[in-house]
Amino acid sequence: MTRNTRLLMSMIFWAFIIYLFLPLIMMVMMGFKDSEFIGFPIRSWTFKWYQVAINDMEVLGIFAYSMTIAISTTILSLIIGTWAAMALGPTKFRGKFILFALACLPAVIPGIISAISLRIYAQSLDITPGMWAIILGHTVHNVPFVTLVGIARLNSQPESHIDAALDLGADNVIAFMRITLPFLVPSLIGAGIFCMLTSFDDFVRSFFLGGYEPTLPVYIFSQLRTGMSPEINAISAIILLITAALGLSAERLMRRNKKKV
């Protein structure tokens, strides 16, 4: 690779970084502006809007509601995804590829189509729009990610571990609880953080499956329809910080998991 080519690639890379992060930086900066008008220049800086957001009981209630959905979705996704990974893991059987494709299908369907179909399905089960319908939709979307991570981890597990446990008198349940599950824990932690992050930030499914009580992304969208406010920027900046912290934690756990493999 010539020097000019490297320079061009470097310029393209940094241009992409600026394109990606500049809007986020501007959004965070607007949350510190001592004015209700969104725009530059910023003549004075303040933490007022962050204090308003933190002390807003409605926002705190919606945040707790969104976290309840995210945690419930994560637990269900880990349980179902682990079961699916065990069923589709190292074991070979006829039709495995078809089942694997079906298990991964919810992750590749466009969000709007998934949301509409889940809304129809929830109504057919007499599940009214609200928390349980959102949990159902988020779980269906997140299970494939847990399954893929679980299968990748199981494929690296030595078969001798399970064989040794069975030879020592353990049944399949005991072997799973004492051998396989501890082996899966690092990857499940990373997958769980990813599921929580995805559920917390999900807008489309929450919008279609939600009732009168909105999740935080839906609430922000409804507020934006009436006009931009620095408080919304402050709330968005807090969400960005939480999302970044969870994402970095997941990345760190996944790297640690790869090193152990």
Image (cartoon, rainbow, N blue to C red):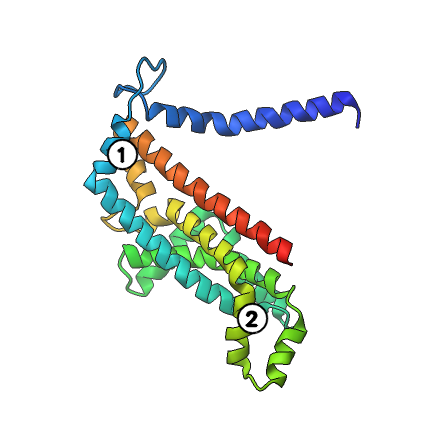
Q: Is residue 119 visible?
A: no
In the image, farthest residue toward the right: 2
| Amino acid residing under circle 2 | Thr
Q: Is residue 100 above or below residue 172?
A: above
Q: Nearer the viewer, residue 46 or 115?
A: 46
Residue 137 x/y as whole percent: 39, 56
Q: Position of residue 43 (x, y in %)?
A: 32, 13
Using a 10 Å C-alpha cutoff, classify the residue at mark 1 as few (fewer than 14 neighbours), some (14 to 19) or many (20 or more): some
Mark seen at residue 223: 1
Q: Quadrant of residue 91?
A: bottom right
Image coordinates of residue 201 in percent, x first then y, are 39, 44
Front-lying residue, 182 or 26: 182
Amino acid type, callout 1: Gln
Which comes sooner in the sequence, label 2 or label 1?
2
Number of other residues with Cα within 10 Å of mark 2, as a class: few under 14, some 14 to 19, many 20 or more: some
Asked if the residue under mark 1 is in contact with the one under mark 2, i.e. CB atoms within 8 Å, the reply is: no
Determine which of the numbered discs, if any, sits on residue 13 in the image. none
Screen quadrant of the C terminus: bottom right
Q: CA distance from mark 2 to mark 1?
A: 47 Å
Kindly identify the residue that appears in the image at 33 percent across and 50 percent down. 67
Q: Is residue 93 above or below residue 14?
A: below
- Please give left or right for residue 112 compared with residue 129 in the image: right
Q: Residue at x 63, y 74 (%)?
A: 161
For residue 143, above or below residue 30: below
Residue at position x 40%, y 61% from top? 75
Q: Quadrant of the N terminus?
A: top right
Label 2 or label 1, whichever lies nearer to me, is 2
Query: Which residue: 47% across, 59% down?
Result: 143
Specify the label residue 180 is tagged with.
2
Q: Residue furthest bottom?
A: 169
